[in-house]
Amino acid sequence: MAITLSSWNVNGIRSACEKEGFNWFYNSDYDVIGFQETKADPSQIPEKVKNKEGYDGFFCSSTVKKGYSGTAVFSKIKPLSIELELPDDEFKGEGRIVHLEFEKFHFFNGYFPNGGAAILDENEKPTGEFKRVPYKMAFFESFFKYAQELRKDKPIVVCGDFNIAHKPIDLARPKSNEKNTGFLPLEREFLDRFTAAGYIDTFRHVNGDVKDIYSWWSYKAFARAKNVGWRIDYFFVSEELKDKILDARIETDVLGSDHCPVTLVLDL
């Protein structure tokens, strides 16, 4: 049986759902759809979104700051269990993880932290460090440890906005971003370790080293029109599912956010 899973950072679900591009969601019959950066709690999400026919909705909202972060999953498949946030108390409150256990795999939808603003020196010049990079990397470590524990039971599927472009091919201007968060060596090194541990970047697995395909574009300087983007949205699967990957694609034609959906098809 083939199942289709998709992931989209909507950058504010209340505004996104009023845009023409959101018809992608209204018309979709994918089996599982994960959203990131919803910036809303369930009471603020319009009924036409929250109660999509044929789907159960699961929502993880920020409790530390309203209108911030947030994730949601819509699923036609009934989960065996539902978990919101990571188990580690240090990383609860920002609404970044929805974890559903299905019969044949654990599914994570994550809005992983970004590195935050640059730290400035006494002369207001960038120091090369970023305020939230330590938190970001600690969050990744906590997630990785937890995924490895769960993986002993059944395979892992994780999707979402990772806020990291893994390799130079994954962004339009790698040289000019070597000192920017999202492409820092220690951020990229995490994805090196993650993939070395047997987590497969499904888009690269299916499409190889295809160039100039991205999932996020800045709203500035007509970046999307010029295709000056970053590939920071992923589907990873643990290698036990390698032979189950049928397709993985980036739906660059879908508008409505500064990100576009990424989609995975598995034969389960």
Image (cartoon, rainbow, N blue to C red):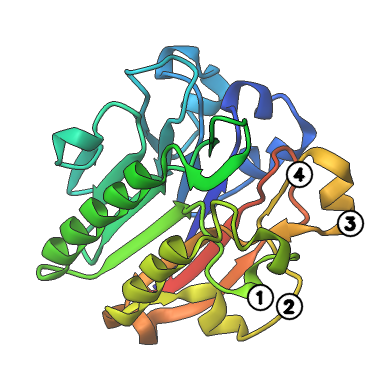
Q: Nearer the viewer, residue 189 or 40?
A: 189
Q: Callout 2, which amino acid?
A: Lys
Numbered disc in front, either 4 or 3:
3
Q: Cα distance, mark 2 to mark 3?
A: 14 Å
Q: Nearer the viewer, residue 140 or 86?
A: 140
Residue 226, labelled with which disc?
Answer: 3
Mark 1 or 2, nearer chain start: 1
Q: Callout 1, which amino acid?
A: Ile
Binning the other alpha carbons within 10 Å of mark 2 as few (below 14), some (14 to 19) or many (20 upward) gives few
Residue 104 appearing in the image: yes
Judging by the rendered image, the residue that carries numbered circle 2 is 211
Residue 47 location (% of width, % of height): 52, 18
Above or below, comparing residue 141 to residue 81 in the picture: below
Say whether marks 2 and 4 touch (CB < 8 Å).
no
Residue 253 location (% of width, % of height): 78, 55
Mark 4 or 3, nearer chain start: 3
Q: Quadrant of residue 172?
A: bottom right
Mark 1 or 4, nearer chain start: 1
Q: Callout 3, which amino acid?
A: Lys
